[in-house]
Image (spheres, grey):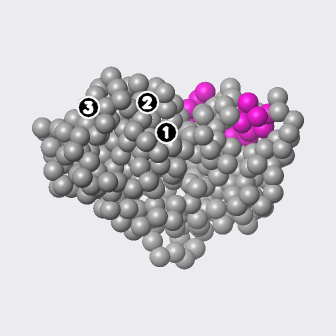
Amino acid sequence: MSSGIVPFGSGGTAPFDPREPVGLLACAGRFPVVFAEKARECGIPVVCVGAVGLADPVLRELCTEFVWLHRMSIGSVCRAFRRGGARRWTMAGKFEKKILFRPWRWLHYIPDWKMLRFWFLRRRKANNDDSLLLGLIDEFRAEGLECVSALDLCPELLVPEGVLTKRQPTKSEQRDIAFGWELAREMGRLDVGQSVMVRERAVLAVEAIEGTDMAIRRAGELCSRGGFVVVKLAKPEQDKRFDVPTVGTQTIETMHRAGATALAIEAGRTIVIDQEATVALAEKYGITITSLVAPVNE
């Protein structure tokens, strides 16, 4: 168990004492699990609130304290963090935003007063990811809880520049990557989504509320011959505390089933979960993964 000081916190204003617990609001995917494993290695207690139906149950074994979140309750999360002594918290994992638009959503998720006030009374221009998540961060800050980036503890998850697989992108894939890169960047600037799917410099699909995997599947349905590329980028002004682009074995499986042959991601700004396994699976399926600062169109 580590007894030193671990740099941890948005903006790096102060070191994080590993004796002080950190709160984790966990949603779907491997990222919350990887964060909890790394925190345990560093001797940092984790007070985890796991979203029911999204968070991996294995977090119960990895975290110092764990509770399930059964409803849309800001107050429940704040109380859990405070009971565990956490003054700082982070969020990790994919939240399926589409569930917000199901019928009778408020009856199903039973929001508390703080959530109702946030949704209906707090003024914002739109209900896109940045507006909602920055608003939630402000709500937690008002409760004395400061949001930090999980990547402050796990910077090694950010992928370096280079081709990760043995197979290099073909000339046609490079052209499609270059074409899709600017489109994906613009979609990120508009806070629409992170990914675009391209074949022969034509856009097959653009990610929106459905998420990357469903957008890839839609591209496969529209391009039954396959051979398309997936470009997934961070927003131009990406806040590292939330919604950092993340890929892993599930991404590769989805690409394989849909017929995609190349994945382009942004170096230093994209998380690759279980990188060794992800690259090995891509090699198995003949998919190339390239991590770029910017594409070269040859």
Dot 3 falls on a residue whose secondary structure is helix
Q: Name the residue under label 3.
A: 257
Q: Looking at the picture, how far across and down is residue 141, in whole percent?
A: 72, 63
Dot 1 falls on a residue whose secondary structure is strand
Q: Which of 114 and 78 is in front in this view?
A: 78
Q: Looking at the picture, how far across and down is residue 7, in whole percent?
A: 76, 48
Residue type (three-letter) at the residue carrying disc 2: Thr
**Residue beneath the point at 28% across and 40% down:** 169
Q: Which of 68 and 95 is in front in this view?
A: 95
**Residue beneath the point at 15% across and 50% down:** 200
Q: Name the residue under label 2.
A: 278
User: Gap between marks 3 and 2, in whole Å?
Assistant: 15 Å
Disc 3 residue crowd, few under 14, some 14–19, many 20+, Cα 10 Å: few
Q: Name the residue under label 1.
A: 272
**Residue beneath the point at 51% across and 35% down:** 273
Left or right of 177 on screen, residue 53: right
Q: Do the residues labelled 1 and 2 touch (CB within 8 Å)?
A: yes
Q: Is residue 183 magenta?
A: no
